[in-house]
Image (cartoon, rainbow, N blue to C red):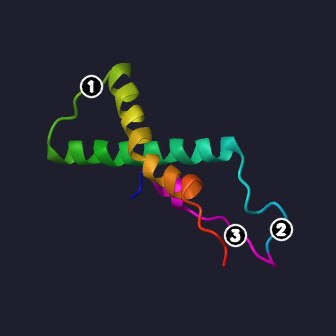
Amino acid sequence: MLLALPGWRRTPSGADAPAKAGVKSFFDRLLEVLVGYVLVGTLGFALELNLGNAFPQRWEFYAVTLSLFLVLGYPGFVWRYMLRRRSR
């Protein structure tokens, strides 16, 4: 669920919210995804250190894990943008 958090998280909207409070730029969303990737990576590295020796990783590892992170975050994108609910 953490992987899809940027797509599921709602921004404030309503009468008391500023005019553009519900709109985030591409860079805001990209920053959310990258921060989530770093948090999950840090958690994984901490678990690896707790279990034993941490293995050195090269750039290929980070390219694959970032791609996997984006693929697993796709359900949040679908939920947020492709399955919008009609207002009643």
Q: The C terminus appears in which quarter of the rendering?
A: bottom right
- Residue under pointer 2: 18
Element on which disc 2 rests: loop
Magenta: predominant secondary structure element? Answer: loop
- Report x, y in % for residue 19: 85, 65
* Amino acid of disc 1: Pro
Which residue is rendered at x = 70% and y = 69% of the image?
12
Q: Which residues are magenta?
A: 4-16
Front residue (pair 64, 76): 76
Q: Quadrant of residue 49?
A: top left
- Residue under pointer 1: 56
* Amino acid of disc 3: Pro
Q: Earlier in the sequence, mark 2 or mark 3?
A: 3
- Report x, y in % for residue 21: 77, 63
User: Given the current orientation, which residue lies at the most extreme right position?
Assistant: 19
* Amino acid of disc 2: Pro
Q: Quadrant of residue 10?
A: bottom right
Tell me whether the residue at label 1 lies in contact with that at label 2, contact meaning CB atoms closer than 8 angstroms. no
Element on which disc 3 rests: loop
- Report x, y in % for residue 15: 81, 78
Q: Which mark is residue 28?
A: none
- Circle 1 residues within 10 Å: few <14, some 14–19, many ≥20: few
Q: Is residue 41 above or below residue 1?
A: above
Label 2 – label 3 distance at C-alpha: 9 Å
Q: Is 88 situated left or right of 82 in this image?
A: right
- Residue under pointer 3: 12
Q: Is residue 9 magenta?
A: yes
